[in-house]
Image (cartoon, rainbow, N blue to C red):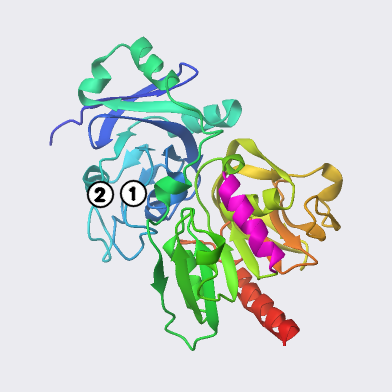
């Protein structure tokens, strides 16, 4: 058995880790972040929200269940690079169709294995997410000082607009296999298949549009609701989508947003967004739902969040700065008090920062898709 080629991970603050090449040989650059899930690495890899990010898996043993087409969240692996400690030498699952390292190589993903991911994660928790590069093969033969210069030459994540990179290029429709309840128009900012499947399972015909869709095209099919998806990048750069959302809200069309969609609802309502030090990425994160006073165990993947003053974190209503009436923080993260959901009280709109579709889990918050059906029903009754 051949020994893997040397690989080097270089962080923008000068710290480096020496390991083995994993996936394709070469070099890759991006913002380095860590994901805490012990399962679901395939969903992480194929989530468009991870575009331009090098993902560190905190779970030590990765790859034993292989890869399969059924669990993919999109048609490709989106991470810029991949960091693991102990890649599995074999694939041991009856659903596996390909090994993880073969999938990484097929999608030209440069990775590194055999490093101390605990030390790396602790470093990122202390210093925050930062620019980084993985170098293997001939790229790893250069001096560390030269590799650091390459890393420092890249753009930071704040200020990046990435929706056009991950969005569909043209509209497509997914028909429900259930009794038809209505239709929903999705603005694809990095949509995951699990979201579409959850909406279709509730009787909705799903129309998916590019991130640059106009209001006329978005509403051409007469949808019962509009949805803004998860996705990568800085919400402060999404002016076109924010203006589009404000037009939807003015028409009082039921709206639901997840992750990036939550941040855009916040900005449409006049709130600011900001970059978290190292973000929330992984599973088993506790969130309080103010409507039920229940704590949900949730899945997260976000590096930005909605900003509100401390006196508005209690779930009490306050006035929107853009003329959409009263709003409130509907969900809050219990680890660090981050806004995890917004609810409009005078128009039919709500959003959450985490992932109720959560593949591979947990599924505590899956009811939020049922809440959309309730909102559509109430809106129909009010218009009759």
Distance from label 2 to label 1 (Cα)? 8 Å
Viewed as shown, does residue 27 lie left or right of 164? left
Indicate whether 327 appears above or below 204.
Answer: above
Main structural element of the magenta stretch: helix, strand or loop? helix
- Magenta part of the chain: 238-251
* Image position of 86 (left or right of 290): left
Q: What element does badge 1 sit on?
A: loop
Circle 1 Cα neighbour tier, 10 Å, few/some/many (<14 / 14–19 / ≥20): many
Q: Quadrant of the C terminus?
A: bottom right
Q: Residue furthest front?
A: 216
Q: Residue at x 83, y 53 (%)?
A: 314
Q: What residue did someone put label 1 on?
A: 77
Name the residue carrying label 2: 103
Q: Nearer the viewer, residue 133 or 349?
A: 349
Residue 11 visible:
yes
Q: Residues within 10 Å of mark 2 (few under 14, many from 20)?
A: many
Q: Is any atom of residue 285 visible in this view?
A: no
The residue shown at (64%, 50%) is 263
Indicate the position of residue 89 as horizontal and vertical percent values.
24, 45
Q: Which quadrant of the figure has residue 327?
A: bottom right
Give the vertical position of 338 relative to 216 (above or below): above
Left or right of 58? Residue 140 is left
**Residue 55 percent across, percent down from the top left:** 43, 39
Q: Is residue 269 magenta?
A: no
First-in-chain label (2 vs 1) = 1
Q: Is residue 12 above or below residue 222?
A: above
Pick the quarter of the image with the N terminus: top left
Whether residue 250 is in magenta: the answer is: yes
Residue 53 percent coordinates (x, y): 44, 38
Tag count = 2
Residue appearing at x 56%, y 62% in the figure: 215
Q: Do residues under tags 2 and 1 come within 8 Å of each other at their CB atoms?
A: yes
């Amino acid at each position: 058995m051949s020994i893997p080629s040397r690989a080097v991970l270089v962080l923008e603050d000068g710290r480096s880790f020496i390991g083995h090449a994993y996936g394709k040989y070469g070099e890759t650059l991006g913002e380095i972040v860590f994901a805490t899930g012990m399962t679901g690495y395939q969903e992480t890899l194929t989530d468009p929200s991870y575009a331009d990010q090098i993902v560190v898996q905190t779970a030590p043993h990765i790859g034993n269940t292989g890869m399969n087409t059924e669990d993919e969240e999109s048609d490709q692996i989106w991470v810029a690079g991949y960091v693991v400690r102990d890649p599995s030498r074999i694939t041991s699952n009856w659903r596996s169709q390909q090994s993880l390292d073969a999938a990484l190589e097929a999608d030209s993903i440069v990775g590194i294995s055999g490093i101390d991911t605990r030390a790396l994660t602790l470093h990122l928790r202390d210093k925050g997410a930062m620019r980084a590069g993985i170098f293997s093969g001939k790229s790893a033969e250069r001096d560390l000082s030269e590799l650091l210069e390459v890393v420092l030459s890249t753009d930071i994540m704040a200020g990046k607009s990435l929706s056009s990179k991950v969005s569909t290029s043209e509209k497509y429709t997914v028909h429900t296999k259930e009794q038809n309840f209505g239709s929903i128009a999705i603005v694809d900012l990095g949509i995951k298949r699990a979201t579409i499947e959850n909406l279709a399972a509730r009787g909705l015909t799903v129309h998916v549009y590019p991130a640059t869709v106009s209001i006329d095209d978005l509403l051409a099919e007469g949808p019962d609701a509009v949805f803004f998806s998860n996705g990568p990048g800085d919400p402060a750069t999404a002016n076109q989508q924010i203006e589009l959302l404000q037009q939807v809200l003015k028409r009082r069309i039921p709206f639901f947003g997840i992750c990036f969609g939550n941040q855009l609802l916040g900005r449409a309502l006049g709130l600011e967004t900001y970059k978290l030090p190292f973000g929330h990425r992984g599973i088993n994160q506790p969130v309080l739902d103010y409507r039920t006073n229940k704590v949900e165990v949730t899945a997260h993947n976000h590096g930005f969040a909605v900003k509100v003053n401390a006196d508005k974190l209690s779930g009490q209503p306050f006035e929107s700065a853009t003329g959409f009436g009263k709003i409130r923080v509907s969900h809050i993260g219990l680890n660090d008090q981050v806004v995890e959901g917004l609810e409009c009280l005078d128009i039919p709109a709500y959003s959450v920062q985490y992932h109720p579709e959560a593949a591979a889990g947990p599924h505590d918050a899956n009811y939020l898709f049922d809440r959309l059906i309730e909102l559509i029903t109430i809106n129909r009754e009010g218009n009759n």
